[in-house]
Every structure is written in structure tokens, then in C-alpha cells.
Amino acid sequence: MSRAAEGGFEDPPAEVLAEAAAAFGLLATPARLHIVWALSQGESDVTGLADRVGGTLPSVSQHLTKLKLAGLVRSRREGRRQVYLVDDPDVVTVVRLMVGQLAERAGHSPARPSRLRGLGA
């Protein structure tokens, strides 16, 4: 049973904290964070993502596999291409908030995604 903290909020159960830590751990690499940021702006295939994030096709593909296994992104076939998109709109919200806040503090303004696609921003 979780206890209420001084502010009146209950502490989340241990399994929820473990799941959140795993999701944050998955996004703890700049490459994966960049991939999720890019996909929050619209669908893309591996080649487009590799060009955008500056990675090799094999490394971006491996990152996408991990993100996909965690349920953060999904893919669909479009002809011969595999197209990736974000599968967890709440993660997009967290990524946009964190990256946006840090960019503002650094004096930069990250480009606002033009196609929000109902992802919580």
C-alpha cells in the first residue's frame, strides 16, 4: 500500500515506478531521444530517421527495435518500406516538455511539430 506524502499525493506502487524508470532508461540515450522527437513530428522510415538523427541504418534500426519492444513506437508496412510512428502519446508529451524546457533554458527554440497527430501537445 502506498503512503500519502505531505502534499496529499499518494506514492505510486513499486511496479509503476519500475516501469517508469525503464521507460526513462530507454530514452536515456541521445539517439533514442532524437528518434522519438523526430517521430513525434510525423511518421518516417529508417532511412529518413538515420538521415535526420545522423546515425547509421543498422544503429537506428536497433534503436527502433528496442523502442518497439517497449511499446513506445510501432511500425506499419507501406509497400516495401517499414514506416515507424510513435505508439505512446504520453511519452511524446514528456519528451516534448523536457526537450522544450531544456532548449528554452539554453536559449534555443525547438521547432514546434507541424503535425501533432493527436499526440498530446
Image (tube, rainbow, N blue to C red):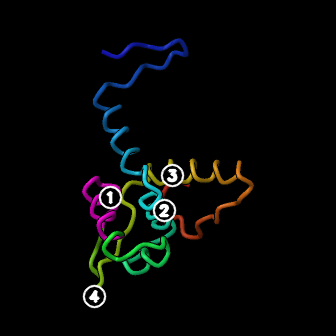
Measured Cα–Cα span from mark 3 to mark 4 = 30 Å
* 46, 59: nearer the viewer: 59
Q: Nearer the viewer, mark 3 or mark 4?
A: 3
Name the amino acid, label 4. Answer: Gly
Measured Cα–Cα span from mark 1 to mark 3 = 14 Å
Q: Are there few (<14), some (14-19), or many (20+) residues within 10 Å of tag 1?
A: many
| Lower position in the chain sequence, tag 3 or tag 4 | 4
Q: Position of residue 22 (x, y in %)?
A: 33, 42
Measured Cα–Cα span from mark 2 to mark 1 = 12 Å
Magenta-highlighted residues: 60-74
Give yes or no for residue 66 being in the magenta stretch: yes
The reply to whether dot 3 and dot 4 touch (C-beta < 8 Å) is: no
Give yes or no for residue 104 being in the magenta stretch: no
Q: Which residue is mark 1?
A: 67
| Lower position in the chain sequence, tag 1 or tag 3 | 1
Name the amino acid, label 1. Answer: Leu
Main SS, magenta region, reads helix
| Lower position in the chain sequence, tag 2 or tag 1 | 2
Q: Position of residue 12 (x, y in %)?
A: 37, 25
Q: Tag 2, which secondary structure?
A: helix
Q: Which residue is mark 4?
A: 79
| Lower position in the chain sequence, tag 2 or tag 3 | 2
The circle on residue 95 is 3
Q: Are there few (<14), some (14-19), or many (20+) residues within 10 Å of tag 3?
A: some
Name the amino acid, label 2. Answer: His
Q: Nearer the viewer, mark 2 or mark 3?
A: 2
Name the amino acid, label 3. Answer: Val
Q: Are there few (<14), some (14-19), or many (20+) residues within 10 Å of tag 2?
A: some
Q: Tag 3, which secondary structure?
A: helix
Q: Which residue is mark 2?
A: 34
